[in-house]
Image: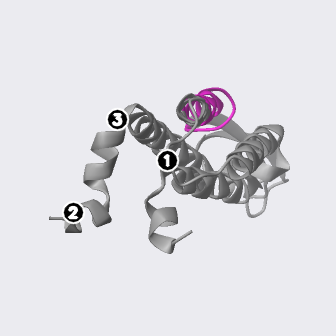
Amino acid sequence: MRVREVLVNPLSWAVACCVAAVASTFLVWDVVPVMGLRLPLTGFGQWPGKTVAAAAVGLALVLLATYNTGRPAAWHAPAVGLAGAGLLGFAVWYQSNAGGHRDTTETAQVSPAGREPHVTTRPVTVAPGDGLYAVEGVGVVLLVVGVLLYRRRVQTPNQALQQTPAASALP
């Protein structure tokens, strides 16, 4: 296999997206306010991040096991497209339910000068971490790769021959 064939193959990009999805689970997904501190939570430390990592590893292994530089299998396009839609939907769901911009209260112990310490609560807004945005980006890219795989699958052999560099060199 030549390097160019691997780089222009949508399956290679799908596998790279799976690696990026797994890497995004090690980024901060959520921040929890506790006693005046902001504790970062990575995706891999929670069940949603582990789910994303498991799905991405599974898809990458299946794609690598069936990898070819020719015409993709009929199931490659729907599998990659559905994985992208699933990642995107899962990240959006997580942001709207568990993470994301949300208003919450923070409990802190306050000790004013000359007074007895007391516990108070105050409203805070918590923003999502970069990991969720990375998962959403990977989901969008996987959707695009799924479309590219579909286009490559339905391409006629004559169209594929016209796009190869060797065919353009022929008189």
Q: Which residue is mark 2?
A: 168
- Residue 18 lies within the magenta run: no
Q: Nearer the viewer, residue 104 or 18?
A: 18
Considering only vertical position in the picture, is 165 above or below 96? below
> Magenta region: which residues?
85-101
Task: Identify the mark nearer the N-term, 3 or 2.
Answer: 3
Q: Which mark is residue 137?
A: 1
Amino acid found under the numbered disc labelled 1: Gly
Question: What separation in Å lies between label 2 and label 1 (alpha carbons)?
Answer: 35 Å
Q: Which mark is residue 156?
A: 3
One can see residue 129 in this view: yes
Quarter occupied by the N terminus: bottom right
Q: Nearer the viewer, mark 3 or mark 1?
A: 3
Residue for point 78% across, 62% down: 114
Of helix, strand and loop, which one carries label 2?
helix
> Which residue in the rendered view is the most extreme toward the left?
171
Task: Identify the mark nearer the N-term, 2 or 1.
Answer: 1
Residue for point 52% across, 64% down: 6
